Amino acid sequence: MTDCLFCDIVAGDVPATKVLETDRALAFRDIAPHAPVHVVVIPKQHFVDTHDIAHADPELLGEVLRAATDVAVQEGLTGGYRILTNTGPDSGQTVFHVHVHVLGGKNLGALAG
Ligand code: AMP
Ligand code: ZN
C-alpha cells in the first residue's frame, strides 16, 4: 500500500471495477457515481493534478484523454458525455492522483457551479 488511493488501485491493492486499460492508463467505475455512467480515468504513473502532468508529460495527458473518449464509446454514450477534471482543493479535488471523470448516460444539463 502507498499513501495514494489510485496508485493502490493500479497496484491491485485496492479493488476497482476496471472498464479499460492501456499500457499507461487505467479506467474504472467511480465508487460514488454522479450519473448512470461515471468512470474515472487515470495515468498509471503518479502525478498530483492536471498542472503536474501537463508540464511533466503532456503526451501521457493526451493518452489519458484518448482513453476517456474510448471509454465513452465502449459505454455507448452516443448522445454525448462530459469529461471533467478537478485541480486543487477549491475545485473539489479529493484524490491527488490526476484523473478525469467521464460522465454520461443521461442529459447532464448545463455545467454550473
Ligand atoms: P475528485 O473529487 O475529482 O478528486 O474525484 C475523486 C473521485 O474518486 C470521486 O468521484 C470518488 O467518488 C472516487 N473514488 C474515491 N474512492 C474510490 C474508489 N475506491 N474506487 C473508485 N472511485 C473512487
Ligand atoms: Zn498515485
Image (cartoon, grey):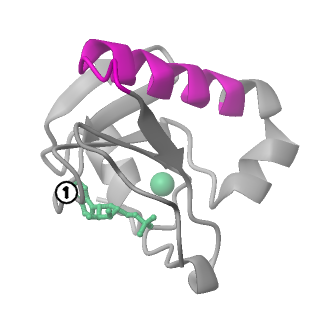
Residue occupying the point 49% across, 59% down: 110
Judging by the rendered image, the residue that carries numbered circle 1 is 33
- Nearer-the-camera pick, 25 or 104: 104
Report the side of 58 relative to 75 (left or right).
right
Q: Is mark 1 within 8 Å of ligand 1?
A: yes
Give how far across and how far down residue 19 sits, in percent.
Answer: 23, 25
80 vs 90, left or right, is: left
* Amino acid type at image mark 1: Pro
**Taken as a whole, is the magenta stretch helix, strand or loop?**
helix
Residue 11 in sight in this render: no
Point 34% across, 32% down: residue: 27
Q: Please count the marks in the image.
A: 1
Give the vertical position of 39 relative to 67 (above or below).
Answer: below
The quadrant of the picture occupied by the C terminus is bottom right
Q: Which residues are magenta?
A: 61-79
Dot 1: element = loop
Q: Residue 28, located in which quarter of the rendered image? A: top left
Image quadrant, ligand 1: bottom left
Which residue corresponds to the image point at 43% horizontal and 68% vertical from the top-left?
A: 95
Quadrant of the rendering where the N terminus is positioned: bottom left
User: Which x, y percent locates residue 58?
Assistant: 80, 33
Whether residue 91 is situated above or below residue 18 in the rendered picture: below
Image vertical order of residue 105 relative to residue 97, above or below: above
Q: Is residue 111 left or right of residue 103?
A: right
Q: Residues within 10 Å of mark 1 (few under 14, many from 20)?
A: few
